[in-house]
Image: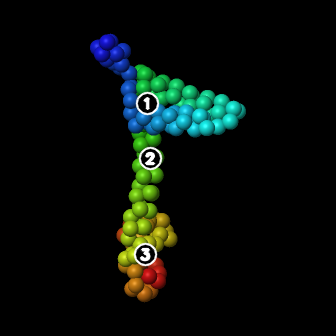
Amino acid sequence: MKQKFARFMFGRYGMDELSKFLTYVTFILLAVSLFLGASAKTAVFTLAVLTMALSYFRIFSKNIEKRRTENAKYLSRKHRITEWFGLRRDMWKQRREYRFFKCPSCRAMLRVPKGKGKIRVVCKKCGTAFEKKT
């Protein structure tokens, strides 16, 4: 049986991060649909089934390059979101010792020590200088 499944999956894309995410979304939607009224329950359940169908379509697809491209786009977006939350977490941990400013030209986040009065901040990314009170 295991060999038959392996032969069936040969040349197919298989499971990746986007497929896992879609599967998790499916289970969440199914759980939410249990607690909703009749009309909303039908809509959420239908959305869950469509999400599951998309996940299985991606897993069993033979168009490997297209699925790889979709997964790369998903991972890029996921990385941007996790990076943003990671920066906010670090800023929260360091809030007692440092102040954070955005560069007015390139929008990079800059960290300067607190309690130094009015200082000149120079962006490491673009070289723009500006004055801020810490």
Q: Which residue is mark 3?
A: 99
Q: Quadrant of the C terminus?
A: bottom left
Q: Which residue is mark 1?
A: 67
Left or right: 53, with 15 as reference point: right
Classify 10 Å Cα crowding around label 1: few (below 14), some (14-19), many (20 and above).
Answer: many
The label nearer to you, 1 versus 3, is 3
Residue at 43%, 75% (x, y): give it: 99
Left or right: 51, with 64 as reference point: right
Say if residue 7 shows up in the picture: no
Q: Residue 27 in the image: x percent, y percent?
A: 50, 34
Residue at disc 1, secondary structure = helix
Q: Residue 128 in the image: x percent, y percent?
A: 43, 73
Q: Which residue is mark 2?
A: 78
- Give the image quarter of residue 21: top left
Q: Counting residues from the N terminus, which is met first, the one under dot 3 or under dot 2?
A: 2
Q: Amino acid at mark 2?
A: Lys
Q: Nearer the viewer, residue 64 or 18?
A: 18
